[in-house]
Image: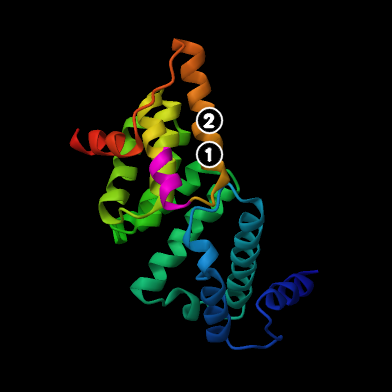
Amino acid sequence: MERELILKALSIFNLREGVKVEEVRHAYFEKIDQKQFKRIILSDQHLEKEFFKYHESYLILIKHYSKIGNEKYFTNYSSDLTFKFIFNQGIYFLIKREYLKAGEKLDDAFKMNNRNVLLLIYLGFLLMKRKNYYAAEKYFLNAIKIDKDNDDAYFYLGENYYRAGKLEKAITMFEISKNLNPLKTATAFKIKEIEERINEETGYVPKTSFISKLTSFFKK
């Protein structure tokens, strides 16, 4: 049974039995560094499954090589690869909805690199899940300061404002996100949902233009 798991894990990376540890590590980071994983993947079940498959297979192989005395080749990473692995552990636990473990790993990664935009957004997302909207906002805003063209940062800041009841701010962020990535359909749905909610509550949907709202937000 254990051998079957190992062979299956190796096959995920298109590797053969008896392959060197270095090749396993290289194959893992090559898969996990694919472009589709450079975004927030938590709303995409297909990407979640793909990421989960690669990371869990790698964990199985780490355990196997540790048993046969080759664990040092896995643990002796460069600082960059160490950061990536710990960060990936955080994402792995987020996918499993084990938020406490996810927070521990993401915090460890943050101590190593506090300017990684994707990490900042994931940390903000985790705080938002905990309903700590004020702290989450800081992470999203920091991500935007580093990369003003990251539509995920604006999208999740908008979601954070929406959950906190700051509806007009939420619309502003979603509109910026939509402007940066018009193909993301979830953003348009969010804008429509918020406008309907404002209309129900006040009978008035704000007609402020996108540019004026953007200017107003960043003046605050």
Instruction: Name the spot of residue 23 as percent of width and height, x first.
Output: 56, 85
| Residue 10 spot, x, y in % from top left | 69, 77
The quadrant in which the C terminus is found is top left
Left or right of 172 in this view: 61: right
Q: Which mark is residue 188?
A: 1
Residue 41 magenta: no
Where on the picture, by quarter, is residue 218?
top left
Residue under the image location 41 percent in, 76 percent down: 77
Residue tagged by mark 2?
Answer: 192
Depth order, front residue of 64/150: 150
Predominant SS along the magenta part: helix
Tell me the amino acid under the disc marked 1.
Answer: Ala
Is residue 132 in view?
A: no
Span shown in magenta: 174-181
Local crowd at mark 1 within 10 Å, few (<14), some, or many (≥20)? some
How many angstroms separate mark 2 from mark 1 (CA)? 6 Å
Q: Quadrant of residue 52?
A: bottom right
**Is residue 177 within the magenta segment?**
yes
Dots 2 and 1: beta carbons under 8 Å?
A: yes
